[in-house]
Structure formats: structure tokens, C-alpha cells
Image: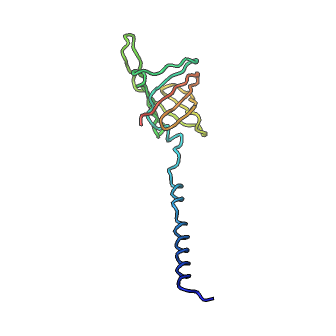
Amino acid sequence: MKTTPKVYSLLLVLLLFVAASSCSNKDDDNNSPPEPTVAELLAHKWFLFKREVNGTVQLADACIEQTYLDFKSDGSFTFQEFDYDNNQNCVNSPVTLGAYSLSSDETKIMVTGAFGDQTLTINSISETELVLTFMNGEIITLKREL
């Protein structure tokens, strides 16, 4: 059987087609950034959004929503509370410093300082919301400004 230049041309085109189709961008899908860890999500400034005590939910108003927890990546945090005085003026407490560490399974935060020594349970955490339960059962929801 005699091979003609047309057959070689056809084989070359097929070979180039197969080679080009094997160079897809499917590998690029694996280059997406990894999901942030709990530690990375936590290390931000979080503002009080709501508080739940004994089943009663209290949404933070314009004054109280200034209350914040600012977790730093070095294991320290600052806390400042805003509330109303007896004359209904919005006032802030002094900034309080503390230290924290995450449990090995990243579901609890052990804090010292601002709240005394206690363990907070992380109910949920995302890029924009953090829900914590204090040892006394109080649940707070904090929001992060992006």
C-alpha cells in the first residue's frame, strides 16, 4: 500500500488536534486559592450584631453595634464595648486587651483578659459572620466589615 502526502497531512492534522485538545485549562481549576482556615477567618475586627440571652434576642442598634472584638493573628485581641449611660448617651468603655488561642479542632477559642479566663464555642464562622457562645450560654453574632 502506497502512502500519499495527503495521508501524511491528515495524520499530522489529527496529531496536532489531539495534542492541542490535551492542553486544556482544566489544570487551572486546581489553582484556585485554598479555603481560609478558621484562624485566618478569625483574625479580623468583628462588630456586635445581635446578642441572645436565655432565648431573648437583642439586635444591636447604632450605638451598641460599635462594640467590637479585634482578633489579631499573633494570638492577642482587643475588645471595646459601647452602650448607653443613665442619660441615654452612647458611651464606650476603655479598650481591653486579651490573649486567645484556638482549640486543636478549631471549634473553641480560649480567652484570657477582657472576659476573664473562659472558653468560647465557635458556632459558625465565615468571611462576614462569627457566632460565638459564651460559657454562661449567651450567644453573640458579630459581623465583619469587608
Q: Residue furthest top?
A: 86
Q: How many marks?
A: 0
72 with respect to 14 (left or right):
left
105 with respect to 86 (left or right):
right
Residue 30: image x %, image y %?
54, 55
81 with respect to 101 (left or right):
left
Residue in view at x 50 percent, y 33 percent: 129
Residue 109 versus residue 59 in the image, above or below? below
In front: 115, or 39? Answer: 39
In front: 57, or 117? Answer: 57
Residue 87 versus residue 76 in the image, above or below? above
Residue 145: image x %, image y %?
42, 34
In front: 99, or 146? Answer: 146
Which of the image's four quarters has the N terminus?
A: bottom right
Residue 27 versus residue 70 in the image, above or below? below
Q: Residue furthest bottom?
A: 2
Residue 49: image x %, image y %?
47, 26
Q: Which quadrant of the view contains residue 92? A: top left
Residue in view at x 53 percent, y 82 percent: 6
- The way the protein has been coloured in the rendering is rainbow
Residue in view at x 56 percent, y 70 percent: 18
Which of the image's four quarters has the C terminus?
A: top left
Residue 63: image x %, image y %?
39, 21
